[in-house]
Image (spheres, rainbow, N blue to C red):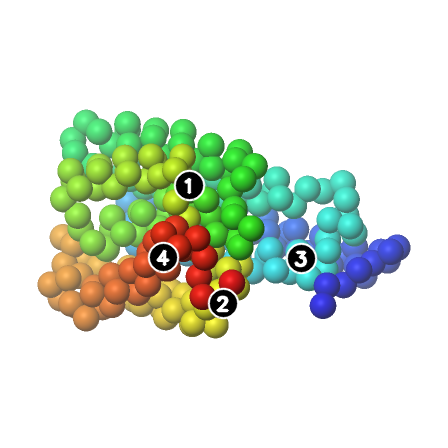
Amino acid sequence: MTERLQEPGPVAQARAWAIHLFTSLGAVTGLISLIAVVDGRPASALIWLGIGMVIDGLDGPLARRYVIWEVLPRVDGAILDHIIDYMTYAVIPAMFIYTFGFLPDGWNLAGAAVVMVTAQYCFANRHAKTPDNFFAGFPAAWNLIAVCFYLLDLPDWFAAAVVVLCAVLTFVPITFIHPFRVKALRPLTLAMTGVWSAVTLAAVLLQTPDGGLQRDYPALFWGFVALSAYFLVLSLVRTARGRLVGN
């Protein structure tokens, strides 16, 4: 049950500030990730982006549970969240793509620019979510695209096509699942999210500079592909049918 506070006391205010501070830690993990990119450490950069995703997944439920916009009405948590998300979901992944050269020669800067420009629309979109909490259009999850580029070792032309496709899908009403807020199949999706996170972490740690994950750890490689496909399939089913079983 949501806690309603008519006259928030010092404990409620301290708790609300603590939740805002927790949200702000996402900027710190983003900074550490950016430093790792500059230092040429892709695995470390992705791990810190992953930690930022954990923070992003937890701060919203906490904020809603304690209705912190009523406790601290002068602080807009949504804007704070968007500032950090643009940094960690767009700016750092764009730098990651540019620095580690996943696109054809001469196109990495253009690809990074596409990421940053199209992501701005996503964060400014007043109708970014459907009533059942799916994202409407590609949700600027460029950090996940960066993970895929690093683990799958795609041909550069294919990676460029992915960037273009995701950029276009930002403006198309295809739906993408929010793993925490969509109620349909939530227990299964949360379980799959946990397994995907563990598999992805292991894959990032074991990937080699020559992209040898598929060669050296094929089960882990294909496990990552299969688990990622689960979220894509649910999103496509929701787009095609307009709902999921359980909505």
Q: Nearer the viewer, mark 3 or mark 4?
A: 4
Measured in 3D between alpha carbons, the distance from the residue under mark 3 to the one under mark 4, in whole angstroms, is 29 Å
Q: Position of residue 88 (x, y in %)?
A: 45, 44
* Left or right: 152 as drawn, with respect to 132: left
**Is residue 160 placed above or below 234 in the rendered structure?**
above
Q: Which mark is residue 173?
A: 1
Q: Quadrant of residue 102?
A: top left
**Mark 3 residue element:** helix
Q: Nearer the viewer, mark 2 or mark 3?
A: 2
Q: Please tell me how crowded label 1 is: few (under 14), some (14-19), or many (20+) other residues with Cα within 10 Å.
A: some
Most extreme residue toward the front, as rendered?
241
Most extreme residue toward the left, as rendered?
215
Query: Label 3: which residue?
Result: 64
Query: Label 2: which residue?
Result: 246
Q: Which mark is residue 237?
A: 4
Q: Please tell me how crowded label 4 is: few (under 14), some (14-19), or many (20+) other residues with Cα within 10 Å.
A: some
N-terminal of the pair, mark 3 or mark 4, is 3
Measured in 3D between alpha carbons, the distance from the residue under mark 1 to the one under mark 3, in whole angstroms, is 27 Å
Q: Position of residue 127 (x, y in %)?
A: 54, 39
Q: Position of residue 182 (x, y in %)?
A: 50, 60
Q: Please tell me how crowded label 3 is: few (under 14), some (14-19), or many (20+) other residues with Cα within 10 Å.
A: few
Measured in 3D between alpha carbons, the distance from the residue under mark 2 to the one under mark 4, in whole angstroms, is 13 Å
Measured in 3D between alpha carbons, the distance from the residue under mark 4 to the one under mark 1, in whole angstroms, is 13 Å
N-terminal of the pair, mark 1 or mark 3, is 3
* Left or right: 216 as drawn, with respect to 151: left
Measured in 3D between alpha carbons, the distance from the residue under mark 1 to the one under mark 2, in whole angstroms, is 21 Å
- Amino acid type at circle 3 is Arg
**Mark 2 residue element:** loop
N-terminal of the pair, mark 2 or mark 3, is 3
N-terminal of the pair, mark 2 or mark 4, is 4
**Mark 1 residue element:** loop
Q: Quadrant of the N terminus?
A: bottom right
